[in-house]
Image (cartoon, rainbow, N blue to C red):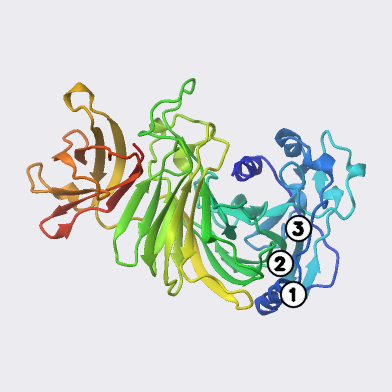
Amino acid sequence: MKRARAWSLLLLGLAVTTAGAAGEAMGGDFAALRERARALAAAPSRSTAGEVPAWLRNLSYDQLRRIEFDTKQSLWAGDGSGFEAQFLHPGFLFDRSVRIWETHPGGARLIPFRTGLFRYQGVEPGLIPAELGFAGFRLMHPFGGRGEPFQEIGSFAGASYFRFLPAGAAYGLSARGLALDTAADRPEEFPRFSEFWLERPAAADRHITVLALLESDSVAGAYRFRITPGAETVVAVTAELHFRRVPGVVGLAPLTSMFWRGEGNGAVAEDYRPEVHDSDGLLLHRGSGEWLWRPLSNPARLTVATFADEDPRGFGLLQRDRDFEHYQDLEAAYHLRPGLWVEPVGRWGRGGVRLVEIPTRTEFDDNVVACWVPEATPVPGIPFALEYRLRWFLDGIGPPGARVVATRRGKSGVHEPGFERFVVDFAGGPLADLAADASVEAVVTVGGVSTPHHVTVQRNRFNGSWRVAFLARPPAEPRPVELRCFLRRGDEALSETWSHLWQP
């Protein structure tokens, strides 16, 4: 996952874009793209090794940042539409190049790579291969409306990674087209978007459409992205996958984020910031209607959890904590990192949301992955269709009831030897209107191995939240234990369900 995190940091300081040359083109027809993916899957996979020279791949992060795109040459600049495109230069971790086409009602044209699109510092342009190709592209849009400055709203670069921004946010987590064998018992396979088709927007369009061809040893796929930026930026995804063979774990609608440290993970020496993370939890809206919140962690060892479900209503990695005081980072602005919500279109059937948490010692690794793993394995030779919406937002998605706002744990010392203490704070929803002496019950389960001890519920008179505290005894044989807790009053659930994987 280190590649993904470095890609994210790189895009914070890179810029790029376009010019044209005609070429044979598939056009902007999604049906034709699906047929092309089918034909590719019926043939041996194509090798793209050596597309980017070794000396470019050996550039450092800072050296590649010094290759700047000439923003005056942005695609669609000055044409009156609400979008512009800029292109990214290969090098460093961008070790594969992509072809990019512009489509319009009259057809399509290949946008050729030219060194004249870039300003080079520390690199001799004459050494750049003429047919190098681009690493990807970024999209620009005036969040403030027509006549306002264009701002970056999103980008596609590296394997099948892409990410977008709602208005007022700072770049954080990423999405991927497909995840194959992530945290499985075999090497992970990284499919890549090898070609893109950018549909020229009309002057009145509030959205832009991008087509992408996905390729890897196991699969070829056709993707369509309909991107609508705003206070909540929505990316409608339609995909059709054609498998040559089926990997062990097929991860659909995958999300990739970073969690280094938070309120429940203790202090890290020699770092002044209380918390460092792009996302602080996984939120699920299950097919049953239950809302479940799993706070993220930086585990001591690789952790994989699967939340079984049928026809999920949504899942996502969120940054709920918006208090700058909890981060104290003026440059990274972690309090402005967006959440990303996956909203299935149609029925996805049975399967589970798979959460992978990878140990890391720095904030430069993307060490968290969430994706949907279908129970019905895709079949080679039979198209696998998928449709969903990605919603990038700062706030606004969550349960109607109270939500978890903090998770803490620690030893109980000499007074309660052999136990671990857990403290979970809930706030909002119906809890906000309850009196301190209201009858509120905490429903706590400890993974079937034991019962919780000394469960208490009390209203926090200082901030109005409600706190659940309980003790749990580790199992006789060390193993992970699933903890769950929610608040209710009579038969009415007052909160989402808190979920925690305890590893004594």
Q: Are marks 1 and 2 in contact (CB under 8 Å)?
A: yes
Q: Is residue 138 above or below residue 406?
A: below
Q: Nearer the viewer, residue 339 or 378?
A: 378
Q: Which residue is mark 1?
A: 27
Q: Residue 98 — which label?
A: 3
Q: Which residue is mark 2?
A: 197
Quarter containing the C terminus: top left
* Left or right for 411, reference 327: left
* Left or right for 115, reference 322: right
Q: Is residue 132 above or below residue 420?
A: below
Q: Is residue 176 above or below residue 8?
A: below
Q: CA distance from mark 3 to mark 2?
A: 11 Å
Q: Residue 330 — which label?
A: none
Q: Residues within 10 Å of mark 3 (few under 14, many from 20)?
A: many
Helix, strand or loop at mark 2: strand
Q: Residues within 10 Å of mark 2 (few under 14, many from 20)?
A: many
Q: Residue at x 43, y 55 (%)?
A: 316
